[in-house]
Image (spheres, rainbow, N blue to C red):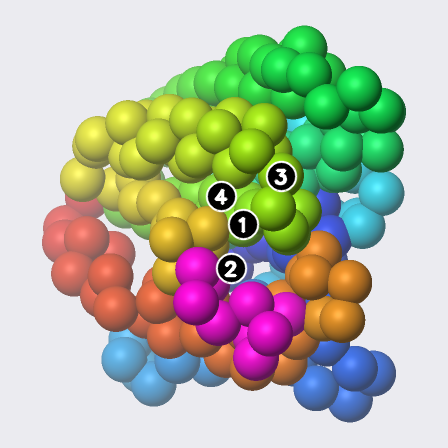
Amino acid sequence: MKYLAIGDGLCAGKGTSLFTPSFVYQHARMSEEVLSERIPVMTRAHSSYRSNDILELLDEEDNIREIKESQIIVLSAGHNDFLDAFERNENENDEDFYQAYRKSKSNLDDIINKICKVKKEENDNYMLAIIGPHNSFEHHDQAEKWINKYNNYIQCRSHSPCVYSVNLDHHFKDQIENWCTRDRHYPNYLGHVEIAKKLHEYGYEHLKKEA
């Protein structure tokens, strides 16, 4: 059993301090307790990655091998695309956020399809958890609108028994001040704890089934 985190700054653990574990490692330890085995963690994530960068990771053979060998896969994508849109959005119109939504949605589709195709070929039991971004842009109607649409789409993609979604925008809604960094862009340690707990709630029954 292996654990793979692939994505942007969320999966890279941004928001935690040097000696505190991100949600990835917290969730992996929770998984170990339930599954009664050691689960090594591999991270293919960076705080600078946009959704297209994450898609390009799947062109690398080493990363495909990690997907083949991993049974717990966590994916985060889209946060930086929307952050870029916010920084460009001088006139507060829909276009920049619409383009961020369109690009992220298309790239996410391709990422999910590639991961699921690899796992289907392996005939392997697995769980893929997709973590949608929270809206860190306070009092910004366009950001709220398009991030909400993106999270709704992620939920629509989690229709198979092995694909799950976590809507951070919904989960963090009334706890931004407590669970996020000062700039609101990333979860702090408490936020990472909450994400790990949310993932843990999905359970591991699908991983226990015979292939």
Residue 121 in the magenta stretch? The answer is: no
Eye-nearest disc, 2 or 4: 4
Task: Check if mark 1's residue and mark 2's residue have beta carbons within 8 Å.
Answer: no
Q: Classify 10 Å Cα crowding around label 1: few (below 14), some (14-19), many (20 and above).
A: many
Q: Which residues are magenta?
A: 172-180
Among the two numbered marks 3 and 1 on one chain, the one whose residue lies closer to the N terminus:
1
Eye-nearest disc, 3 or 1: 3
Position in image of residue 86 (x %, y %): 76, 33
In percent of the image, x 16 and y 61: which residue is there? 205
In percent of the image, x 66 and y 47: which residue is there? 137
What residue did someone put label 1 on? 134
Q: Nearer the viewer, residue 93 or 34?
A: 93
Position in image of residue 123 (x %, y %): 29, 33
Position in image of residue 22 (x %, y %): 63, 73
Marking on residue 140: 3
Q: Is residue 136 visible?
A: yes
What residue did someone put label 2 on? 3
Q: Which quarter of the figure has residue 159?
A: top left
What residue did someone put label 4 on? 132
Task: Check if mark 2's residue and mark 4's residue have beta carbons within 8 Å.
Answer: no
- Quarter of the image with the C terminus is top left
Q: Nearer the viewer, residue 109 or 170?
A: 170
Query: Which amino acid type is shown beneath numbered disc 2?
Result: Tyr
Task: Check if mark 1's residue and mark 4's residue have beta carbons within 8 Å.
Answer: yes
Query: Which amino acid type is shown beneath numbered disc 4?
Result: Gly
Among the two numbered marks 1 and 2 on one chain, the one whose residue lies closer to the N terminus:
2
